[in-house]
Amino acid sequence: MEVHEVDFEPVGRRGQCRKDESLLACAHHHFIGINSVCGGQGKCRSCKVQVLSGDVSGPTSSEREAFSTQELENGWRLACQTYIAGDGKVNMPPESMSAVQRIQVEGLEGKVEVQPPVQAHELTVSAPSMTDQRADIDRLLDALNAQYNLHCDRFDVDVMRSLSPRLRSWKWRCQVSVRRNEVVALGSWPSRHLGLAIDLGTTKIAGYLVDLSDGRTLAAHGATNPQIGYGDDIISRINRAIRSPEKGVKLQRVVVDTISKMAADLCAEAGADTDEIVEAVVVGNTAMHHLFLGLPVKQLALSPYVPAVSGALDVKARDLGMQIAPGAYVHLLPNIAGFVGADHVAMLLAVDAGQVDASTIALDIGTNTEVSLITDRNITSVSCASGPAFEGYHIIQGMRASSGAIERVEITADGIRYQTIDNAPPIGICGSGALDVMAQLYLLGVIDDSGRMMKEHPRVRLWGKQQEFVLVGDGDNSGEPSVVFTQGDIRELQLAKSAIRTGIQVLIESNGCSEDEISQVIIAGAFGTYIDVSSAIAIGMLPPIPLDRFRQVGNAAGTGARMALLSGRKRDESNTIASHTGYIELAGAPGFKRTFVEASYLGRYRMRNGKREAID
Ligand code: FES
């Protein structure tokens, strides 16, 4: 049988595909997770890919229906309908990838020249003698400054404590890590030269172990923010810290312990030691930033909602209790305002906010959604309290994006098709699945534009006091309980999506633009990356602009944190971004309440001066 080599990007996997198997079958054969909601029947578009090179079969009728002529010319195809006829390369957009593959995508590298603020130097120091009785520190600094033309004159006290015995055990040859004019770590030669980048989200923490010598990400892990046990959202955690100083300390400690454990796990995966991590960068929203540092948070919850500190900071890791090299620093990017923090700065850094097209909207969807409008004049940001519904919380059968979560749904008059993570039996719905369900039920008329669920559909039933739609019935679920989507779930999602659309609208109006003028919408964040944008438009969460203007970019805050870890110049850029970004307090914006109410309606509509205008 004729076989061809196919490169699957961006995961960087190559596999042999037989001439008689579709691209989808070939990908699955090589354990590359491409979505296939309709099971390969060419009916759902969830398997769309872009053929970048190589001969393939001609488009089928389903593909002609799914794509415009221009899109077909640009290589867009349905993987289940396409057969390979020569060696080639295929790109999988994030929304077509299953959960397993997404973890790899979140490791995508940002473009950055590797010039970390901490440099490692190999050093041979002359041993002391009766004619050379200089102190060990002096002989090391003299050798270092002479060999590398530096002006290093500071020595971390913890490094100092272990210096003399270690130098002797290494026979006076070592690796010295220097940050500006300070020695921050010492190792035997050669040692690993590692950095840790952390995106500290309200609900999730993402951690990346980075090789500072070449910029490679060696390992990436995610964890739930343990502070969630003290409150789902920022305000409830701030209130906890205000009510009880001990709780504030606890909030700091649990998150630091999680980061330290993550650092240990990342090092174990990469065969490294946590002492080899000589620098860390942490980004988070302003409340997470303050709680991580143990700073007061009361003023964040009180008008006019100001941070205790907004500039970039360098803090010794040990002063925070972090278990990495004792002399290492943690660099914190600057905050913009009380509710737009360093994670948004990192995201703007990652998407190159200074260079993107004018009239770009960049949003990072999470428990708190930050949105910026970038024009050729300035950047303006808002913060939207979107809550944790899109992370699977506050939804009756909501769950995180993990095995068994329904992540894609298609409901037609013929029935329901869904896809679960790992193709496991369905046990709940994650954010992208909930968004799809809401959009599909709205398009089928099962819920109206106010969000009310109609009684007429055979799958709608009354349970207790509320209506619910049975997505997976007991009988269809191999003995597992049914999975339902309730009227209450719709209300939670309406609040979340209304907050986001209101934020976008306030930015557009305050900058004197219209939705039509938006040239690009960049969507970041784990949830935002994997949503079906057309579902988000169908429920009125995003403005109805052409789909090709949307770009889903993954965990851009994490990418920005890694860029700042690898480059002093990027740190300077982040300071410039923060100081040039204006902030609008959403609740104080003219017509906020009216806009919020209007934006809670479902459907495709434009907003003008806080009023909906229906469109086709
Ligand atoms: S269109 Fe290919 S799997 Fe549905």
Image: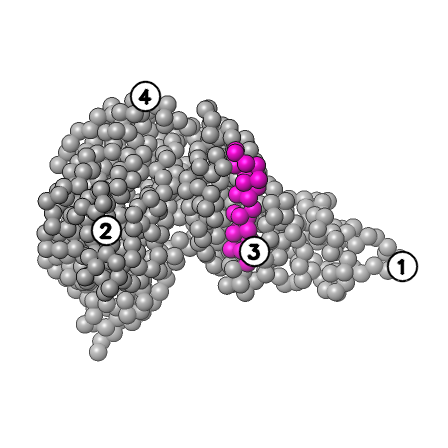
Q: Is residue 243 magenta?
A: yes
Mark before the other along the chain sequence, 4 or 1: 1
136 displayed left or right of 86: right
Q: Are marks 1 and 3 in contact (CB under 8 Å)?
A: no
Please state which amino acid type lies under the numbered disc 3: Leu
Q: Are marks 3 and 4 in contact (CB under 8 Å)?
A: no
**In this rendering, which labeled residue sits more in front, label 2 or label 1?**
2
As measured in the structure, the alpha-carbon distance from the residue carrying label 4 to the one carrying label 1 is: 79 Å
At x 74%, y 56%, the residue is 163
Mark before the other along the chain sequence, 2 or 4: 2
Task: From the image, tell me which residue sits under label 1.
Answer: 130
Choose between 194 and 527: the one closer to the eye. Answer: 527
The label shown at residue 484 is: 2
Please state which amino acid type lies under the numbered disc 2: Val
201 displayed left or right of 517: right
Give the magenta range.
241-264
Within 10 angstroms of label 4, few (less than 14), some, or many (20 or more) residues? some
297 displayed left or right of 3: right
Where the C terminus falls, by quadrant? top left
Q: Identify the element where label 4 is drawn.
A: loop
Please state which amino acid type lies under the numbered disc 1: Met
**In this rendering, which labeled residue sits more in front, label 2 or label 4?**
2
Please state which amino acid type lies under the numbered disc 4: Pro
Where the N terminus falls, by quadrant? bottom left
Q: Is residue 172 magenta?
A: no
